[in-house]
Image (cartoon, coloured by chain):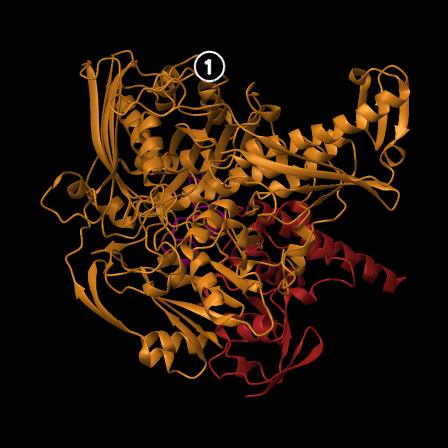
Amino acid sequence: MSDHAPARSPQDLDDSIAGGIGESPTRPDGALKVRGEYAYASDLWAEDMLWGATLRSPHPYARIRSIDIGPALATPGVYAVLTHSDVPGENLYGLKIVDQPVLAVDVVRYRGEAVALVAADHPETARRAMERIEVDYEVLEPITDPELAAHDTTLPELHPGGNVVRHQPIVKGDPEASADVVVSGLYTLGMQDQAFLGPEAGLAVPAPDGGVDLYLATQDLHSDRKQTAQALGLPPEKVRMTMSGVGGAFGGREDLSIQVHCSMLALHTGKPVKMVYDREESFHGHVHRHPAKMYYEHGATRDGDLVYVRATLYFDGGAYASKTPVVVGNGTTLGIGPYAVPNVRIEGWGLYTNNPPCGAMRGLGAVQPALAYEAQMDKLADALGMDPVEVRIRNALSQGGTTPTGQVLDYPAPVAELLDRVRRLPLPAEHDSAPADIRDLPGGASNTTHGEGVVRGIGYGVCIKNICYAEGADDYSTARVRLQIIGGEPLAVVHTAAAEVGQGLVTVQQQIARTELGVERVNIHPNDTDVGPAGSSSASRQTYVTGGAVRNACEAVRDVLLQRVAARSGESIGDLSLSGGKVVSSATGVLADLADVIGDDVIEETREYHHRETYPLDEELGTSERAQVQHAFSAHRAVVDVDTELGLVKVVQLDCSQDVGKAMNPEAVIGQIQGGSAQGLGLAVMEEIRVDGGTIRNASFTDYLIPTILDMPPMNIDVIERADPNSPYGVRGVGEPPTISSTPAVVAAIRAATGKALTHTPVAPEHIIADIPR
Amino acid sequence: MRLSFTVNGRQCEADDVWEGESLLYVLRERLGLPGSKNACEQGECGSCTVYLDGVPACACLVAAGQAAGREVGTVEGLAEGDGLGAVQESFVEAGAVQCGFCTPGLLVATDDLVNRVPHPSDAEIRESLAGNLCRCTGYEKIMDAVRLAADRRASSEASRSGKTDA
Ligand code: FES
Ligand code: FES
């Protein structure tokens, strides 16, 4: 951290809270958060700071003929107006493919693309100056249909190399297999927004060494630093990043937003510059979940055994690649769901269009196919006259089973058990006559029904999600653990770059250190780039990899201590352990106080954790001995009431069974399942960014609705722990699966209540009223 | 313009306030009280909820000038001395805080609810908090926190009135 740290910069989390692994201690940042003192990125403040703003393209596709910044620059209070020619380094960045300009040069490829920057003494001055930047556009016809982008070679190429970001086939067994019972369908999914509440924000402070200190909210400091340094033309060590409070992320903070822009303005003006997006800009300023169009065909025997699945998936990546390659990888490899199928042919396409860029969101690439394969399983059950849960259980993947890529699951895969458990959870009471409270009916307090036309439906969904990065990525994490005596007591400090985005990683890190070191007091140092990379807080991976790194670093610290005591006492190191601030021998009892062993020393160790190796997919067949590190599973049951006349839906209850391997913090696990399920419910019935001709029509919380406390029903949650022998403590990623299986469960329940086909998600009232039967 | 009003019982002044600024902006950027949050600045999320003369309001929708001479209460005023207030404590204990960005607004809304209604039903809690979006928790633990806060408020009222009676 620099000497010029801004006011309200992040601080050590030092609340004294007890509790080790498997307990549910409260969050170390909880008190700060409820006091309103936790420093979020939008709260940052520095003496004399300026406000930055971003001018964005009003067109989805246009050539830029000229940009005139003169009038804007002449505005009183304006300190800088910058365009592409001011980008000091490489004017391109990207997570997987470096294809996105920091500031547009001669073409804009989406509505909302950054074109120019302003720094001024007040946010309103900056806004007004922005209106005075004159950009002369030649408007072009946008490409908005991803399926066309895949196949129509007459379309213009949006990027050198064409409009296909990734095409991946997966073939297993006989791709042309036939079967007695066949069901098919075309399913579409709208564009979902992460809708984290804390807007994109940061404060860049120019440093005397010509570098910059950036305080920000992100999911991955080191990935941001690498891309930012390149764009600024600076060595990475001159771009220092410190995490401020993050108001949720859900994938939407993996790509750069303010990072380079804010730094450019600070370096240019020599003053601290703060940027905060408002909600509308946030909708334009981050990637969304890929909309998808999915053709599916399932074949089964008359007994209900799946014979084959064939599918073609189109993912609309929008103007820049972001995580599209991974979405295609996940979407295809997980495209048949958690089922054992002998014959598979899946083809996945990720495309460039002039729609808003799409990238990471919770459940990356696995959410889309789950809607299709689960709808297909219900359709199959219907065709067979079987119970939908029975068909799923009959075909469920299990330990020792093989994925379509040929990976053998060498860990528990309790898919059938989860389905069986979730269907046994208690159901809500039927309200046959009028229910007690009108607020419990579809339409709620708007008083649209007293029960007439209301039909109840129950639906199920189950899913598979890979945990950690895949296909050969070594997304390791680093932890530094320091142990010393402060005020006569041992104090451990854990330092990582692993982004706390709300999920509770800070709590889990403390729990691990308390358990591994047998101490009470564990502080969490703010996340920054002074320690090695932790990778992204995504892919449900941080408890796994950063948990592993913290464990490894603690073990290293413990080894130093135990060696000292072993040398002194002559006991064998294998007999020694740490507990209650003491070194204990299994042979002779308490040997020493940590305070005496450590004295004035500081014992500090830094360790990495690398998950086991994975390998790329074969380009033609998609085969790979191990494409993914681990898989996680969850099952949902939804109970809905539908006003079949108005098409209004009330989700009455949403229940979940999930295998988490090991519940490191059981209450936090439940919090993840509840929150993930809410996002899945939102996708099922309300959340869709309306894109019309490449332009977002509902960039506000007035028009893009997310579930409120009135929309979320009570949940029964059933957590099981089937340890993964390959992961630290047996953990299995928790955050994503509940976002995936909840949506198809809710949609299935609405289908059950209405008998309608409902092939588009989110389900809108007009779909329910429209007369399209299943 | 120059603006003066009371925040959490303290008289505050802000100079050079531009007429277009909201109460939220003045609190956060001019008075050093960033506790109230800015998730939408359009009156849709409740993250900026403050008391205005004792009534909850979205600070982002209040023009700064409208607050002149009035009493504003923010999340920073909910603590009890050095310790947490009952509502704050309940949110931490119930696990109702994840990223925490919605929390300040929810705390003010909950404080208002448990002050007005001693034993709110679940339906009343949901209705009162329907204007406060949370993207992380799915609201279940927020429900737990509000029930806990209501119980605590009610039992501390009971013991207080018990004492006066005695
Ligand atoms: S910030 Fe005021 S309601 Fe959202
Ligand atoms: S805790 Fe993150 S928005 Fe509520």
The hue in which chain B appears in the rendered picture of the protein: red
Query: Residue under circle 1?
Result: A399
Vertical relation: A490 (above or below) A39: above
Image coordinates of residue A586 in percent, x first then y, are 84, 17
Q: Main secondary structure of the magenta part?
A: loop
Image coordinates of residue A9 in percent, x first then y, are 63, 60
Image-based side of B78 in relation to B48, left or right? right
The hue in which chain A appears in the rendered picture of the protein: orange
Vertical relation: A479 (above or below) B32: above
Res. A6 image quadrant: bottom right
Question: Does the stretch in magenta take in A433?
Answer: yes
Vertical relation: A429 (above or below) A282: above
Image-based side of A289 in relation to A663, left or right? left
Image coordinates of residue A253 in percent, x first then y, are 45, 50
- The residue nearer to you, when weighing B107 against A112, is A112
Badge 1 marks a residue whose secondary structure is: loop
Q: Taking the image as drawn, is residue A216 in sight?
A: yes
- The residue nearer to you, when weighing A617 against A606, is A606
User: Residue drawn at (32%, 55%), measured in percent from left and top?
Assistant: A101
Which quadrant is home to the N terminus of chain B?
Answer: bottom right
> Disc 1 sits on a residue from what chain?
A
Confirm if mark 1 falls within 8 A of ligand 2: no
Question: Does the stretch in magenta take in B161?
Answer: no
Tell me which segment is drawn in magenta: A427-448
